[in-house]
Amino acid sequence: MVRWLKARGVVAQRLTQSHNPQMEYAGSKCWRSLLSACFSLVLVGALGLVIIELALATCVEASQATQGHPVPGGAQARGTTGCDASLVASLSQALSRGGPEQIEQVLTRIMQCRELGSDVLLRTGTELMERELYPEASQVLSGCAHDHPDVFECHYSLALAEFALQRPHDAMAALESAAPGLKQQELARYYLRGKIREALNQPREAEQDLWTAFSGHPSNENYALDLGLFCIRHREYTRAVAVFQRGMSYHRHSSFLRLGIALAQFLGGREAVAVETCRDILALQPNFSSARLLMAFGLYVGGRYAEAEKIAAAGLRDEHSQQPYLNYIHAALLLKLQSREYNRMLQELALSSNAIPNCSLCYFTESKVYQALGNSQAAIADLEKAVAQNPKFSEAWYRLGSLYDRLGRAEDARRAFSTFREVKAEKSSNETELIHDLFIPALGKADPGGALR
């Protein structure tokens, strides 16, 4: 299964050196704001394999409905023709070894051949989406839907390509243009329509569609994953756990569903329970790096720094782990453990901030390292970057005001403390709202090419 979401965020830490109890509490909430997207890479493969399952279910359903009767249209409606095999082979060769010009030439031949069956066009569109060539896939699948208007999968695949191109209105039009299908096809339509409606900022309608798909086919692991993540995106952590657990009743050994449960537990404030859930995952799949990562976060929040550092360090030795996030949490843990490996911390934080977009807490933590080294100017520079990226980062404003004051910059200190009080008064800015404000939106950016794998 290929990624269909790209994680944009980093797991950050609580204030590590402040003695202000309010600041310590707020920091614990703020660092959660950088957690969720770390796991979207493995959790949100929810469009993956939907088309394959859809096709299989359609074949079974159709065969049951037409036993003893020929399929309308027969092979001519959906099958292959004499020129199909050579064109598909040429496209595969061009994609693997050719350049853009060769690919364009083959696609031109495909679009000019009016005898191609829907299976060939669907296969071509699938291969293009696998290579993330979504504009080309959209072109081929538009032809498929035009030439074979009665084939549900042509319209569905076109909708996936348009969704990947972040054209939700076009995706909705393609999806709704498909004629009524069999049961599994209609459930797939509900599912994808729910994704599109969420992108169109229609959360109520999106939820209804996702629930309809899941209720109609609760054993579909993808439907459970995506509905559970919808609940997480909308802060309904208890419901998310319930959805994932129901999915697990059909897929007892699913590491993805278990990770979804752990993530909902963590974001819901049940860090210790999330740690044990991650421990269960690792017992089943020792090399599941995301579970190891979340476990390190949970241990960190629980104050079990030495244990968390060992897990993070082990993850850094695994080339398959999410290195930028582990670099961040490991540097934060070294600070908590009062390590003097400052150069290592700075190296790890530099790697994190370079790889993770808008990592305000990377700069926040780096400022602490510079402060420990006695470099107040560098610490101030990092804090200024942090508040520029996240103007509601109250802890950064507080520390910035303190450093300004220490260096005699009274007016700057006054403004920083004033801003701190303003953003601190907004309760949402210091709660797990930051998760959704900064990183949860990234979960909605799909790469539905994985749906065809």
Image (cartoon, helix red, strand yellow):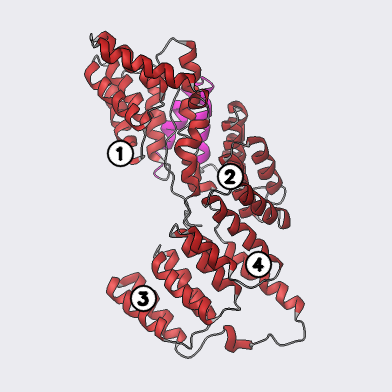
Q: Amino acid at mark 1?
A: Asn
Q: Main secondary structure of the magenta part?
A: helix
Q: What amino acid is labelled 4 in the image?
A: Gln
Check disc 4 and report the residue beneath it.
185
State the residue in front, 286 or 2.
Answer: 2
Q: Earlier in the sequence, mark 2 or mark 4?
A: 4
Q: Secondary structure at mark 1?
A: helix
Q: Secondary structure at mark 3?
A: helix
Q: What is the x, y in percent for residue 167? A: 46, 59
Task: Say whether residue 56 is left or right of residue 323.
Answer: right
Residue drawn 32% across and 16% down? 415
- Gap between marks 2 and 4 measured at Cα: 22 Å
Label 1 to label 4, Cα distance in Å?
Answer: 43 Å
Residue at 30% x, 73% y: name it.
98
- Which residue is label 2 attached to? 229
Circle 3 residue: 93
Task: Residue 247: say if magenta.
Answer: no
First in sequence: mark 3 vs mark 4: 3
Q: Which residues are magenta?
A: 290-319
**Residue on which disc 1 sits:** 354
